[in-house]
Image (spheres, helix red, strand yellow):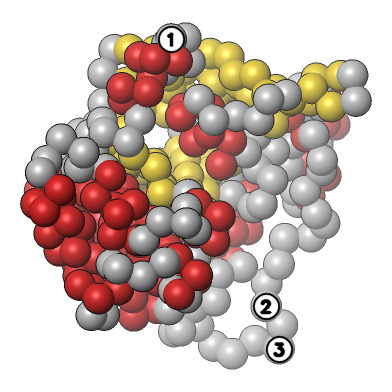
């Protein structure tokens, strides 16, 4: 369904090019759910924006992103418009700004189904609001976004993306604003979508619990580069890259004994790490060597760490 080969994203900042995504490669089959995880600033959202042709004006994408054989990165704007929203849908991270404040929620949803009679489109929009657990959906559809809470607006964005039954769904932190009960229901709904319609899903998240519940495979990003790529079950059972190990160790577990302090990864991410030589995780890694600081490790057998694979 989607094959990304050597994706790069660069931004012109103060007269120089800064690389935010460096050589990301991954593939997603029909009905598969791929999780894209990593700390803030690792380049996860920029991958999605590049695929949708929504980078900022100072941004530039390179490499290939083949959607059913068509390269999204070189596609003419008009051709890309015919794919976006219909065959490729996106759930944006910020529901506060993604909805039109001047239109009723139901009208915005019904616009997705412009090919249907207005009454039928409205009926399906209300039904989808019910599926994403909006209470009193028929009445709520006639209200404006400012009358919804942040969590309810996020559910509206999810409903809008699902209405078109896309072949590929890009989801940028889709459950961030939701409480845990609604979050579980939405994740189940996304899982049903993948299973029933064979929709491929690429989901960006900080929440490893979301990954464990929904994803088939996981790609771990740090500093704009892929650190590890593996099946979700394999990653949780035996993470191989030091960064993946750190992320899992920092995740609270109900069954774990109470510790005086939570486990953390020392240090902070480097700005523009993808533009610097060596492994971007080197300054924070317990296994770091001089070679790690000088040479960029390549992804071999799903892991980019010479100290682990040697």
Instruction: Give the camera-side residue of 233 and 88.
Output: 88
The CA distance from mark 3 to mark 2 is 7 Å
- Closer mark to the observer between disc 1 and disc 2: 1
Q: Residues within 10 Å of mark 3 (few under 14, many from 20)?
A: few
Instruction: Please name the residue that numbered disc 1 is placed on.
Output: 76
- The residue at the point 11 percent across, 41 percent down is 116
- Residue 57, image x, y percentages: 68, 25
Give the quarter of the image for residue 138. bottom left
Query: Between tags 1 and 3, which lies in front?
Result: 1
Residue 262: mark? 2
Quarter of the image where the C terminus is located: top right
Residue 58 appears in the figure? yes
49 shown above or below 70: below
Q: Is residue 153 left or right of residue 213?
A: right
Q: Give the residue number, with chain letter if any, for mark 3.
A: 260
User: Residue 74 in the image: x percent, y percent?
Assistant: 47, 9
Q: Secondary structure at mark 3?
A: loop
Q: Is residue 31 left or right of residue 96?
A: left
Rendering coords of residue 293 (x, y %) = 82, 31
| Element type where label 1 sits in the image | loop
């Amino acid at each position: 369904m989607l094959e990304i080969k050597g994706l790069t994203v660069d931004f012109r900042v103060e007269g120089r090019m800064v690389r935010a995504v460096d050589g990301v490669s991954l593939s997603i089959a029909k009905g598969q759910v791929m999780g894209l995880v990593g700390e803030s600033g690792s380049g996860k959202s920029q991958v999605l924006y590049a695929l949708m042709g929504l980078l900022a004006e100072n941004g530039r994408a390179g490499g290939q992103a083949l959607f059913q054989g068509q390269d999204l990165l070189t596609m003419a704007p008009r051709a890309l418009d015919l794919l976006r929203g219909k065959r490729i849908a996106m759930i944006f991270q910020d529901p506060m700004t993604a909805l039109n404040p001047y239109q009723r929620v139901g009208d915005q949803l019904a616009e997705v189904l412009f090919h249907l009679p207005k009454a039928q489109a409205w009926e399906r929009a209300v039904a989808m609001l019910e599926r994403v657990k909006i209470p009193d959906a028929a009445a709520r559809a006639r209200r404006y976004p400012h009358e919804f809470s942040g969590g309810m607006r996020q559910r509206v964005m999810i409903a809008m993306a699902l209405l078109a039954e896309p072949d590929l769904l890009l989801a940028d932190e889709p459950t961030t604003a939701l409480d845990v009960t609604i979050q579980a229901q939405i994740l189940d709904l996304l899982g049903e979508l993948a299973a029933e319609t064979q929709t491929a899903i690429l989901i960006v998240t900080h929440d490893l619990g979301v990954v464990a519940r929904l994803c088939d495979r996981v790609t771990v990003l740090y500093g704009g580069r892929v650190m590890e790529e593996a099946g979700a079950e394999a990653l949780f059972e035996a993470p191989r890259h030091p960064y993946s190990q750190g992320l899992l160790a920092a995740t609270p577990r109900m069954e774990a004994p109470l510790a005086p302090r939570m486990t953390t990864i020392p240090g902070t991410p480097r700005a523009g790490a993808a533009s610097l030589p060596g492994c971007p995780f080197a300054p924070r890694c317990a296994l770091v060597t001089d070679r790690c600081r000088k040479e960029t490790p390549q992804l071999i057998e799903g892991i980019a760490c010479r100290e682990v694979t040697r």
